[in-house]
Image (cartoon, rainbow, N blue to C red):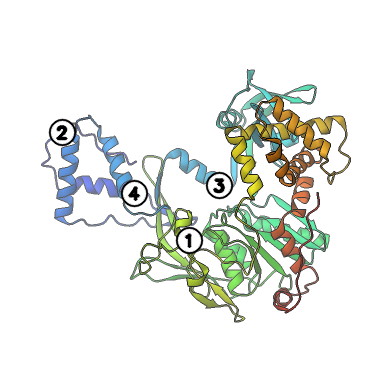
Amino acid sequence: MADALPETPGTATGRTRGVVAALLFVGLLVLGGVWAGRALTPPAPPVASLGGTKLFDQVLSAVAQRYVDTLDMAAIYDKAVTGLLSELNDPYTAFLSPERLKRLDEQISGTYTGVGLQVDIRDEWPTVIEPIAGGPSELAGVQTGDRIVLIDGVTTKGWTFLEVSAALRGLPGSNVSFVLERVDQRIPLTLKRASVLRRAVPRVALLPGAVGYADVKVFSAQTTTELSLAVDSLIKQGARSLIIDLRGNPGGLLEQGVAVADLFLDPGKPIVQLRARPGSDAQTYADKEPQRWPTLPIAVLVDRGSASASEIVAGALQDHDRALVLGTTSFGKGSAQNVYPLVSGGALRLTTARWYTPVGRSISKLAPADPDAEESESNGSARGATPDTIKPRFRTDAGRTVLGGGGITPDVTVGDSLTPLPVQALARAMGKNFGAYRDALAKLALSFRSSGVLKSPGEPVTREMLDALYRDLVERKVAPERRIFDNAGPWISRSLGYEMTRVAFGPDAEFLRRAQDDPTMQRAAALLQGSRTPREVFSRLEQKGVEVQATPPQH
């Protein structure tokens, strides 16, 4: 909301025409903006017709003077801004309050001030999921599974996640004291809050078959640097191919998406084209630097949570036949936004262009109600989905067919977005008590760790372990019918196996266990293994009569 000159009921309306409209638009667009991280010259305020200005002035005056509930001018301007942006019918255009802008800045920079903990609520207590690498908590020896029972002398039982987050964050250099409960120990700690880097590539691993793996979670200011270092590290460890996991990556900075694609393409290759309103020149981003790893076979993983810059990378590498794309169809956000700081301390996030892949694909979802309508953005619901049978077809550099509209369609579809029926039945039976199921898993895993029964990260989940879990649910008075529990047994075994592996052996061990059960990752690894060049990956896929099988899950 922009600051405005105060007005009160009864003020005369004979002011210079256009003052109100000018305040609205100039307040919105003052101070310039950001185009995916770069400063822009602020756009000039639009010239309203005399009729439009007069209409707005009259409505504003009537509301201010005669509406049944008294509203101050700040509230009226706030509602005017909200209404204007709402009428654009664009889910990506929004007013950002100072708090929302701060969260966006943290996402873009990848940094925040705190103690560096990933925390969840288990059995009504804040419980450490993982200390962030290099943060104050990790350096102080905080471990996965530790329960935070006191913060600054106050018990944390029953606290919400937001309350815990607010207590642990604060000014750089300030102290926070808390007490950890670890098995039968209580450990007091006083930590100094510091700038914590939330890594854009938090997981890097060498999988069996010399397949490197890099999990890219967001396109923040350091994504390209982190990914480049990760690939170099994997190659030194012996990796001969690479999986880039963009599943669940919501995007971020446009320039970072372009820079990541630049790592794997040849100079001059187009990466993405931005098209603004009619009459404006299109802006094409092309590769500038030679490839770092030109012979490295690559697979890119996407799903419904992959959006924006993730889709730019996947689309560019797919169009140029540089990477095989696997998974499920991505989100379908084919637009770009500017962020304009406002005098109120907030900002305006405004859609200013649509983007297209190198071969000219728009991946924005199409509104099904009017097949002849222009492309429109969707809020992510199934309503905006476009069947593959009516999607426009394009040709890659090598002549392969790829689809436009409604997200990036993978070369190999792997993974089912439907929850298995036994798991659905378990969820219905648990209802609002499903959180107690997670708490029971965590408690059982901690008991296994303290008793020393877990000898290796691949420890199988036994029938006795499942019986112990069910008894705990009975004691909590939230147990489903035993038949429903047993039918969901394979999925319960997996979740219990992941939990006890993480608690006893750490997040890296948990990841490797999950990877064995991940059909998309296993299929990608199977296609990459033995491929010496990027082209060989596609050749293996195209071989008739040869079925590449994923490694069977292990429990």
Q: Residues within 10 Å of mark 4 (few under 14, many from 20)?
A: some
Residue indicated by mark 3: 107
N-terminal of the two: label 2 or label 4?
A: 2
Mark 2 element type:
helix
Give the SS element for disc 1. loop
Q: CA distance from mark 2 to mark 3?
A: 44 Å
Q: Earlier in the sequence, mark 1 or mark 4?
A: 4
Q: Nearer the viewer, mark 1 or mark 4?
A: 1
Q: CA distance from mark 2 to mark 4?
A: 25 Å
Q: Estimate the x, y position of residue 97 in percent, counting from the top left.
A: 42, 40
* The one of 23 and 458 positioned closer to us in this rendering: 458
Total marks shown come to: 4
Asked whether residue 391 is in view, the answer is: no
Residue corresponding to mark 4: 86
How far apart, in angstroms, are the residues tagged by discs 3 and 1?
Answer: 28 Å
Nearer to us: label 2 or label 3: 2
Q: Label 3: state its secondary structure.
A: helix
Q: Position of residue 473 (x, y in %)?
A: 70, 30
Q: In the image, what residue type sits under mark 1?
A: Ala
Does 160 sit above or below residue 88?
above
Q: Residue at x 53, y 56 (%)?
A: 253
